[in-house]
Image (tube, grey):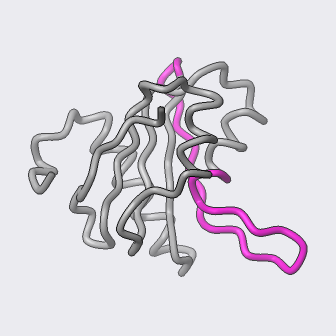
Amino acid sequence: MTESAALDPEDRKIVTLARSARARNGVPEGAAVRDETGRTYVAGTVALDSLQLSALRTAVAMAVASGAESLEAAAVVSGAEAVTDEDLAAVRDLGGAGTPVLLAGADGEVRARVEAG
């Protein structure tokens, strides 16, 4: 997908938030998820000696810790070519198999849209 401008405004918002988290924190990935009420949760990669989490798994964990019961969508900004199976599993656990996951580059251009399932 190269037509990021064609994204739903709410999906564009989570891509922008994910991109901002990545740039602001100087981390390899930024991510954002939107829950069933429209609230968003934004995170970057966690890389501690004792804890390693991708940005997307961190954003999902933040949503769960804040009481989210489901996800409507997720976005990750990364240099990776694909969303990892572990990241998709985390989104699927909270949002279900049909939850859309957007993968964008550092420029915010969406390169792929996959379902968590």
Is 3 on the left or on the right of 89, as rendered?
Answer: left
Is 107 on the left or on the right of 117, as rendered?
Answer: left
In the rendered image, residue 73, in percent from the top left (x then y), is placed at 43, 33
Is 17 on the left or on the right of 36, as rendered?
Answer: left
Whether 54 is among the magenta residues is yes
- State the image quarter where residue 77 is shown: bottom left
- Vertical position of residue 81 compared to residue 92: above or below: below
Q: Residue at x 39, y 75 (%)?
A: 79
Residue in the foreground of this view, choosing between 15 and 56: 56
In the rendered image, residue 3, in percent from the top left (x then y), is placed at 9, 51
Q: Residue at x 73, y 33 (%)?
A: 64
- State the image quarter where residue 62 is shown: top right
Q: Residue at x 59, y 60 (%)?
A: 55
In the rendered image, residue 57, in percent from the top left (x then y), is placed at 64, 51
Residue in the foreground of this view, choosing between 100 and 26: 100
Is 103 on the left or on the right of 45, as rendered?
Answer: left
- Vertical position of residue 82 compared to residue 47: above or below: above
Magenta stretch bounds: 36-58
In the rendered image, residue 24, in percent from the top left (x then y), is placed at 50, 73
